[in-house]
Structures are given as C-alpha cells and as structure tokens.
Amino acid sequence: LTVVCGVSGAGKSTLVTDLLAPAIRAAIAKKKDGLTGKEAMTVVAHQGKPAFTALSGLKGFRQLVVVDQEPIGKTPRSTPATYIGAWDLIRERLASLPEAAIRGHAAGFFSFNTSGGRCEACSGAGRIKLEMSFLPDTYVPCEECAGTRYGSAAKAIRWNGKSAADLLAMTFEEAATFLSFDAKLGDLCGLMVKTGLGYLTLGQSSPTLSGGEAQRLKLVSELAQGLPTFRERSRGEIRPNLYILEEPTIGLHQSDCRRLIELLHALVDQGHTVVVIEHHPDVIAEADWVLEIGPEGGNAGGELVHAGDPESLAKQKKSPTAPSLRLTLERGLVKKPAV
C-alpha cells in the first residue's frame, strides 16, 4: 500500500494518473515488465523529450484499475445493481432457468428499462410522475406493479424462490448471503458490504444516493473490474492487479474512511498493489510506503520531499504533511492489522 501525498497542486495527480498510469497500462497491454522513457512517449504527454528514464517491475500484473474523481451518472433508470454490473449477471442467471427458457425469455426480458417483463404502466420505473401546476413534480408508487417495476410474467420466474422484483428489493447485505453460491455475484455484493453500502437495496434509484454513497459506489464499480473470471478461478490463474485511487476519502465520514482502509488492506493481503493519492492522515498512517510531493503547489512543487514509511515522514521538519501525521500516529488513531 503506497500513498502519494502533498499539498494541493504539488503534482501528485500529474505524477500518478497523467504519467505513470498510461505508461503502466501500455506496458501491461504489451505484457512487458516495463517501458523506457522513449517507448512511453507515444502514450504519455511530453515536451519533446522522455518524461522519465525507465519504468520497470510490472511483470505479473493482470491489469491496471484506476479509480478517479469523476462523478457517477445519476439517472432515474440507474440503480446500484445496474451501475456495478450485478443486474446484468442476475438477468443472465434468470434467463438460464428452465422456466424462462421454456417461455422463450432472454436476459432482456428481465430488464426494467426495455419492454418485455417490466410493468408497462410505469415503464419499469416503479412509480408514476404527477405533474403539478406551480409546484415541483411529485412521484407516487405505481398501482399496477405496487412499485416492483415488473409484471406478473417476470414475477412468475423464480431463482431459488426469488423473482427479479424480490431481488431488487433485497439489500446488498442480504444479497451477499443469498448469492454466496455464485462466485461473481457474491464477490460484487460482498464489495458493497465491505465499503459500508450493504444497507442499500439493489433497486434503489441512483438520484437518491448521497455524494459519499455515490463515491463509494463508483469505487466498488472500479474494484469489480479486478475480480477474477470463472476461468481464472477454476484454473488457479489468479494474478494480482495494480490499483490507483485518487483521493477516495472525499465525501466519506470517519467511520466510512475506516471501512475504506480495511478494504485497501484486504486488497493488499490478496496480493494486489495499491497506490493511493491522498491527504487524509489516517490513510497515510496506514501505508507501507509514502511519497510526499511538494514542497508547495504550482511552480514551487513537483519535487520529491520524502520517501519512506509513515513514521519517518512524521519526523521530517520541512514536510507540510508531517504535523498532522505525527498527531495521528501519537494518538494511536490507526492500528495496522497484524501480519
């Protein structure tokens, strides 16, 4: 677990997301251990000369997963399950049931965004929009489907006793237990629980999510890209990923930060490498290695202020990060799990 810290504008994102990430992605795509600075000029912004001498140590990584700060789309048709890709998998599982095959129902039949098994009275929204003059529009549950989004034909198809409507009404914590027999779905729902989103239902409308919830949902969506496939699991070919996260604690409560830290440790324990751009002292204190870029922002930044473990950074007198990190370490606010 490596943390890159420093004041705003010091060059953290430039170093990690603008320089390293595209070079790493290119090397992994070519199945190479690294790239020379000259080779990287085709994928990295430069000023007529290589931005670095050489990049190495990438052999064995399965892929690069980057989690940035771009907000998620909050359309009324989107739900947490659709956003992380779990609903596509569930629709495929429902379509593979004998009862669905006999009736000719494909995966699209179980989508609430297209005609088929959805309730046509509300077009799969589960609610009806009431337009009120001189007042904001309001919504009421659809009387036809009672807010479940689906018609009777779709509800008749049951997977281990649960219909598509029943599954949408489940919380991710309930779904993680119910779907534990399915490796991919179990892992997806498990990630939601680990990031503190286990209380959300699979079918909750995305516009109702808070900023912090939306940020963690995006984190799960990106981390899910690194989950091994069934083929990789069965053959024992699970290789580590390289994760880059850009300020993942933004919008999170202190308790949610704790869950995030535990998730990062879990990724490292599984053999993955995690690089985090972060200024939160609790996250910095948990790192195995810290790079501070600075010492200031803009033209006064872009230099390596310190490289080492958190304890050594806390002792640096010229580090802008050291005072807050020192307090965190002295108060014992963080505790690394025993190895």
Image (cartoon, rainbow, N blue to C red):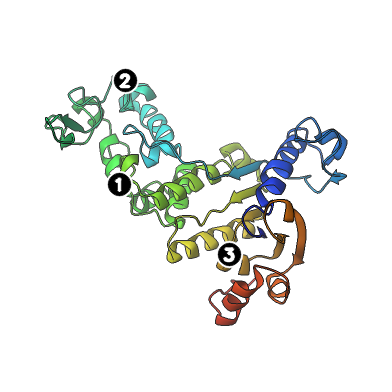
Q: Residue at x 12, y 31 (%)?
A: 132
Give the structural element (helix, strand or loop) at label 1: loop
x and y percentages locating residue 46 in the rendered image: 79, 36
Q: Amino acid at mark 3?
A: Val
**Quadrant that contains the C terminus:** bottom right
* Frontmost residue, 193 versus 141: 141
Residue receiving disc 1: 170
Q: Amino acid at mark 2?
A: Ile
**Residues at circles 3 and 1 in contact by the CB criterion of under 8 Å:** no
Residue receiving disc 3: 283
Looking at the image, is 130 positioned above or below residue 51?
above
**Residue 102: which disc?**
2
x and y percentages locating residue 1 in the rendered image: 66, 60
Give the structural element (helix, strand or loop) at label 3: helix
Looking at the image, is 283 positioned above or below residue 42?
below
x and y percentages locating residue 260 in the rendered image: 51, 59
Instruction: State which tag comes first along the sequence, 3 or 1.
Output: 1
x and y percentages locating residue 310 in the rendered image: 68, 70
Looking at the image, is 180 positioned above or below residue 278?
above
Q: Amino acid at mark 1?
A: Met
